[in-house]
Image (spheres, grey):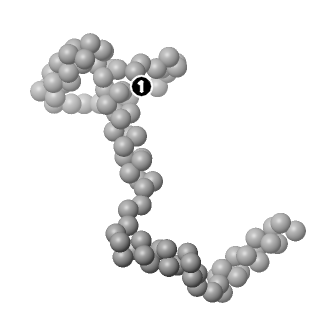
Amino acid sequence: MPSTAAKDDRISIRTPPELKRMLIAAAAVSNISMTDFLLNAARKAAETVLAESRQITLNQQEWDRFMDLLDNPPPPNAALRAAMQRHHALLD
């Protein structure tokens, strides 16, 4: 999945020799350059990490509590009322 965008930025990394040999071999087996191999692997890992950081997982008890709060929200407290007043002041 080589990118057609300009490749102006550079990343330098140090690696143990055995890992470098493994990366070179994996890139060769994949029939792509080591740069493209590393970029593809890094992109996949970054996408996974970012997707997981944006996802919230709830157990059944937490889900039930969440749904109950949506159906029966607590009354506004002082901090929420103050925030709404500031918001309305900005809109006026």
Residue pictured at 80% horizontal, 72% vertical: 88
Left or right for 1, reference 71: left
Residue 74 percent coordinates (x, y): 58, 85
- The front one of 45 and 7 is 45
Residue pictured at 42% horizontal, 71% vertical: 63
Question: In the structure shown, which secondary structural element does the residue marked by tag 1 occupy?
Answer: loop
- The front one of 57 and 67 is 67
Left or right for 80, reference 18: right
Label 1 crowd (10 A; few <14 / some 14-19 / many >=20) = few
Left or right for 34, reference 10: left
Quadrant the N terminus occupies: top left
Q: Note whether residue 30 is visible.
A: yes
Q: Which amino acid does label 1 sit on?
A: Arg
Is 61 drawn above or below residue 24 in the view shown?
below
- The front one of 9 and 33 is 33
Residue 80 percent coordinates (x, y): 66, 80
Residue pictured at 34% horizontal, 69% vertical: 59
Residue picked out by circle 1? 10
Number of numbered discs on residues? 1
Residue 47 percent coordinates (x, y): 40, 40
Quadrant the C terminus occupies: bottom right
Residue pictured at 17% horizontal, 18% vertical: 25
Rendering quarter of residue 16: top left
